[in-house]
Each structure stands twice: as C-alpha cells, then as structure tokens.
Amino acid sequence: GILVRDIGILERANSIKNLVLGKTGVITSGKFAISNIYPASPEISPSEVLLKAAGVESFSHHPIARAITQAVSNYKLPVCVNFKVEAEGINGKMDGELIHIGSERYIESKIIFINEKLRNDASECRRQGQTVVFIANRQRALGIIGLADEIKTSTHEAISQLKDFGISLHILSSDDKRTVNSIGRRIGIESVYADVLKEDKLEPIEKLQRTSPTGMVSDGISDYSALTQADLRISLGNDGVDSDLIDAIVLNRKLTGISDLVKLSRRTAEANKQNLWISLGLSVIAVAAATAGFLTPITAAALAFIANLLVIANSLKIGNLLQTDNSSANIIRS
C-alpha cells in the first residue's frame, strides 16, 4: 500500500511532469555485494585491502560498510581509533596508520597519490555499473573495492509505466557519473545528475522546476535537501525519513508503487471532471425541464438524486479499476 499525508497529494501527483529518482534503494536494492578487489601493486594482497577497509567501515552503518564488514565476518578486525566521517569518505587509525576510505574525489582531496593502474581498474568497475571505494593511507591509494548493487526487479516495469504517463525521468546520485550512467543505460533513463554532494542535491530539482512541477523519490535522509525542494516528496519505505517532510510512503519499497500512485491520481482527476459534468449536466436539464413545465418539482428532485447516485457510482469505479489492475495503490491517509 501507499501511505499519503492527505488526499490533496493525489491532485499534486497528477500535476507532476518531472520525476527525480535516487539510485541506491530506489532504482537498486541497496544491498551491496563485493564484486572486485584490486590492490594498487603486487606487494599488497586483496585480503589486506579488504581488512583495512573493514576495520574502518566497522564504525559505519552505510549499506556499503555492511557489505564490506560482512565479507570478513570470520576474521578478527584490526582495532580502529579516531574514527571520523567526512563529506565523501571516512577515516580512522589502525596500528598507528591513518586509513582513508571513500570516493576517488575524496582521496584526491587529501592530496594522496593514485596510480594509473587503480584508475583503470576503477573505470572498468564503473563501466559494469559498480560503486567503487578507494582505500588509502597518508601517502598513496592501497587499492579499490568494486561493489555491485542489483537493479530491483520492479524497476523496468515502473519506468515503462511512468514514461507512458508522459513523465520525464531523471536519476540523482552522489555516485560517480560513469557508474550512474551505466545504470541509466540499463534501465532506459538518459538524464543523469551524478557526482552531486548531499548538500548540493537541491540544485537539479530547482533547475527542473523552472520547466514544470517536479517530484523526488528517495529512500532516506541522504536526499534531504532535494526532498525539501521538490513539489512532491515520496519515500520508498519509512526508514530514516521525516514524516513531516514526506508526502507519500510506498510501504513495499517497489518503484511500481509510484506508477500506481500516478495512475490513481490520473483516474481520480478524470473521475472528478466526469462527476462535475454529470452533476452539472443533469441539474441544468432538470431546471430547464421544470421551468418549461415538462417536469414536476418532485420529478426534478428525483433527477437530482439520480445525478448524485451516478457521481457516487463513478467514484467507486476507480477502486474497482485498481483492483482489476492488481495495483498496490491502496491509499491510507496519515
């Protein structure tokens, strides 16, 4: 089902022309798995790269951190101290050595050397749609870990349906542009905003709003600034979201819930127009006929009552259509 803040959300959903999708947890499952480990040089083993990463990541609750630490669950991790979270990475000391973990841009911001081999390995991982994590000490990058995040089975169907509704789709992510472009190509979305820092995510929303109303779909607080700016704010699942900020929550976390919400909003708008014409049309006919003497006042009143019944029946038809379509859009008002 879908939890909406108020029934007016349906009217707003009907007006949306742009829909911005977060990547992790929206398009993809958010359940990362290690695909590749590339050391920077032969004297560094893949297990050394993984253990250094896991030692620092053990303090983090990010899905990538969980994937890395689960891969070494049978090992005793080195003790990490002075753990610190920064804009695009984390760091901590192990055995007196400061270890940085994060994006390529984060490592470069620390003026740390990355050799050509690692850059090429990272490019190959991104070409396959993997998220790349760099591991480095104070002097140089020690290796990278490539992690795959599977595209949800419901994603392709939802994107096809949303395109049929005439909605323009966009991806917004902090991940590397090559990784996000690879995923975009696989699901048929060309418009990609990648390498966007968390605090800068409202800018693409503002840009799209200059053309038409824009909605945002996220799975948590990493897209907070974008959500605050969007005309329609939707969350897949209710973990870590501000209920006062979100307009609608898709409880089953499937992207098809968004297309169901749009479908319901379109049919509700269509039914409202039909109801207006039914009520107005029969009222005009009844008044005109009664004025001309063709109907008695009692018959005119009966005709008005019939108009009300037709309006109710037409409104109930929306629910029947959704059940026929096996839709998940069972609206629950909060």
Image (cartoon, helix red, strand yellow):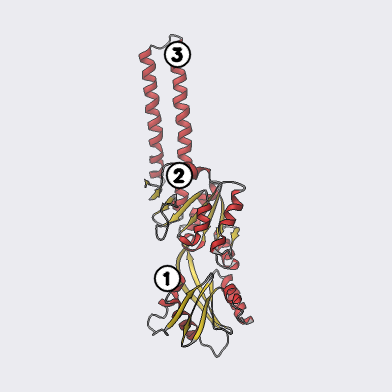
Question: Does the residue at mark 2 contact the one at mark 3 (Cβ under 8 Å)?
Answer: no
The residue pinned by badge 1 equals: 61
Q: CA distance from mark 2 to mark 3?
A: 40 Å
**Above or below 220: residue 17:** above
> Distance of mark 3 from mark 1, alpha carbons?
72 Å
Q: Of circles 3 and 1, which is in front?
A: 1
Dot 3 amino acid type: Ala
Q: Position of residue 90 (x, y in %)?
A: 50, 75
Q: Residues within 10 Å of mark 3 (few under 14, many from 20)?
A: some
In the rendered image, residue 298, in percent from the top left (x then y), is placed at: 35, 14
Which residue, given by chain and number where applicable, does mark 3 sit on?
289
Q: Nearer the viewer, mark 2 or mark 3?
A: 2
Q: Earlier in the sequence, mark 1 or mark 2?
A: 2
User: Camera-side residue: 175 or 316?
Assistant: 175
Q: Residue at image x 37%, y 82%?
A: 74
Percent position of residue 140, x then y: 58, 84
Measure how far apart labels 1 and 2 are at the Cα level: 33 Å
Check residue 8 in the rendering and tell me which mark sits there, or answer none.
none
Residue displayed at 59% across by 46% down: 212
- Secondary-structure class at tag 2: helix
Q: Please tell me in which quadrant of the rendered image residue 199 appears.
A: bottom right
Closer to us: 248 or 79: 79
Mark 2 belongs to which amino acid?
Answer: Ile
Give me the residue at 58% from left, 61% from top.
185
**Residue sitting farthest toward the right:** 116
Q: Which residue is mark 2?
A: 9
Q: Quadrant of residue 138?
A: bottom right
Question: Which residue is more in the foreground, 199 or 220?
Answer: 199
Q: Earlier in the sequence, mark 3 or mark 1?
A: 1
Q: What residue lies at 43% left-to-right and 10% top-to-bottom? A: 294
First in residue order: circle 2 vs circle 3: 2
